Amino acid sequence: MIPRGKILVAEDDDLTLDLLSTVLRREGHEVATASDGQQAMDLANAGSFDLVLSDIQMPRASGLEVLRWMQEKFPDTPVVLITAYAEPGAAMDAIASGAADYLAKPVDVVALRATVARSLERRRLASENRSLRSVIAARKVLVGTSLPMLELYKEIARVAPTDATVLVTGESGAGKELVARTIHERSRRSQAPFVAVNCASVADGMLESELFGHERGAFTGATAQHKGLFEVAEGGTLFLDEVGDVPTKMQAELLRVLQEGEVRRIGGSAAVNVNVRVISATNRDLGAEVAGGRMRQDLVYRLNVVCVRVPPLRERGDDIVALTHHLAARHAAILGRPAPHVSNEAVALIRNYAWPGNVRELENALARAVAMSQHGVILPGDLPTLTVGAASGRAAPIDSDWPTLEVLQRRYIERVLAQSGQNKTAAAAILGIDRRTIQRLGNRDEE
């Protein structure tokens, strides 16, 4: 189906302008016309267009000036330049300037239709791709079907509809904040804010102001009233990550907020009522923190009404394979690439590593692999060195007869050769290497 769009045509020659607008309207497009560059920019500024066709030589502003202006103001709108010179140099100049395409005068009707259809289709696909990338990139979801994850899903389903205070426990990088967000999204508060703060990362002495707010003049530098995160999260969920790092002197105030449902800003006397669900997280043993005098026991009771444990990656079995493909696709989408194929050799290396940093470490490794991979395939060499080595003695040993990277790369070349019918020229083009490299490989095998 031919895409239809709203098109602006800028052309100072009346005959050419009539031809272009007539053909485009017969194709079902909505067309606006301008007789010079300045008028084209005025029209574009006043209305939204899917495509601009602009002659290069025009009074008041040239087509190149229109192109540069559109790139600055409306970078998503393609511009096709029309030139009087049907020369390769003119085409290259137009494309080098950022034009989506170019047409030569006298304009051929068939070429006009094809160029417009192609440009509109590219715009549609680019728009869809941006939307998809933003959804995928912004959306983090829990992935896995292992028994520990199924138990976690059940706990989330049970606790999410309630207003119970939840303590999420687990190792660093296991996905505690993602669990907290999932609980919020499945709760009655899902349309209200989800506000997260890492208690360990806030500068010394500032956490109280960050959580409870302050009045103007409360301390040096307090030049204006500041609402704390309890107020910002009104009606929603406040996530206190690394809650075990809350200073001892603040714990009594945090307990009072949880008990009374009200905060007092620093320097203020009036209590502010807050309706907030608190979910906290820690990778510490809070019982040991209480025994060591670093945490108030009554605060721990308040935080730990329901405890949800996030399993470490090493307990999740084959979830790591599903996570690998999911995270690789997610980071490829962020880069605007199709989801890569993760080679069996790379998957084997990933499965053979202990991942002490859990999902966060795996995600960082795959983000690097996606960026480094070529031709849509993640190979062992694309993974960080850490993946194939030891991690503080915690990595599982790699089999002594595991093939070397050179052997793995040769296998990949052989696979591409087989898929191309042993056509070395075609295989070299796919791999992005010189045909002589493949020839040398063959000669070496014959030795």
Image (spheres, rainbow, N blue to C red):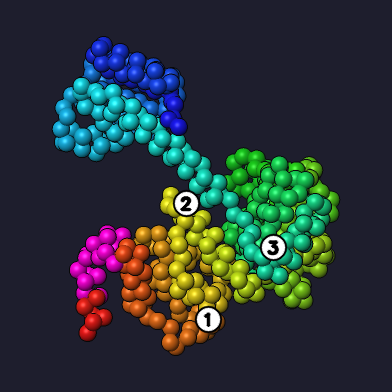
Q: Give SS at disc 2.
A: helix
Question: In terms of depth relative to the viewer, which is nearer, 313 or 378?
Answer: 378
Q: Are dots 3 and 2 in contact, CB under 8 Å?
A: no
**Start and end of the magenta stretch?**
422-441
Q: Which of the two discs, 2 and 1, labels the residue nearer the N terminus?
A: 2
Q: Give SS at disc 1.
A: loop
Question: In terms of depth relative to the viewer, which is nearer, 291 or 36?
Answer: 36
Residue farthest to the bottom, as pictured? 400
* Secondary structure mostly taken by the magenta-highlighted segment of the chain: helix
* Residue 389 x/y as whole percent: 45, 80
- Quarter of the image that includes the N terminus: top left
Residue 18 location, quadrant: top left
Q: Is residue 159 above or below residue 435?
A: above
Q: CA distance from mark 2 to mark 1?
A: 29 Å
Q: Residues within 10 Å of mark 1 (few under 14, many from 20)?
A: some
* Residue 94 x/y as whole percent: 23, 33
Q: Residues within 10 Å of mark 2 (few under 14, many from 20)?
A: some
Q: Residues within 10 Å of mark 3 (few under 14, many from 20)?
A: many
Name the residue rendered at 40%, 59% in the picture. 376
Residue 263 is one of the magenta-drawn residues: no
The residue to which callout 1 is attached is: 395
Q: Can residue 318 be seen?
A: yes
Name the residue rendered at 50%, 75% in the picture. 348
The residue to which callout 2 is attached is: 334
